[in-house]
Amino acid sequence: MTISANNGWSATAETSRNGNVNYAVGAGRWSAQTGVYVSKPFDIFLAVDGNRLMIIMAIGKADGSKQPIKALFSRKPIKFLNDKT
């Protein structure tokens, strides 16, 4: 899959070869106009659990270590106007 975010990064990721589509791993890069992370590459891990999406990016630092960036998104179920629950 290809991911293009509205805050200046994009990545490609694949699900595991054993068929588990609940997570994907890949690599990406921040754009040339993205402040402190300008043009930096990163590894990415995405996981879906129900209505939640977790994203972990690992950006290489000058000393060789990796800086993690973690984000967790959740989606509320759609509630229709005539739903009495």
Image: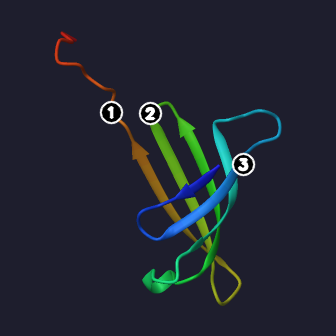
Q: Which quadrant holds residue 56?
A: bottom right
Q: Is residue 82 left or right of residue 34?
A: left
The disc at residue 51 is 2
Tag 2 near tag 1, CB within 8 Å: yes
The residues tagged by marks 3 and 1 sit, at their Cα atoms, a distance apart of 26 Å
Quadrant containing the C terminus in the rendered view: top left
Q: Is residue 32 above or below residue 51?
A: below
State whether residue 12 is above or below residue 77.
Answer: below
Q: Kindly indicate whether the residue at mark 2 contacts the one at mark 3 (C-beta within 8 angstroms).
A: no
Amino acid, disc 1: Lys
Total number of numbered discs in the rendering: 3
| Residue 29 versus residue 83 in the image, above or below | below
| Left or right, residue 35 beside residue 45 | left
Residue wearing tag 3: 14
Classify residue 66 by image quadrant: bottom right
- Residue 22 in the image: state x and y as whole percent: 63, 36
Q: Nearer the viewer, residue 19 or 69?
A: 19
Question: Of helix, strand and loop, which one carries label 1?
Answer: loop
- Answer few, some or many: residues within 10 Å of disc 2's Cα (few below 14, many 20 plus, some between 14 and 19): few
Query: Which residue does the numbered mark 1 point to in the structure image?
Result: 76
Q: Nearer the viewer, residue 51 or 6?
A: 6
Residue positioned 67% across, 89% down in the render: 63
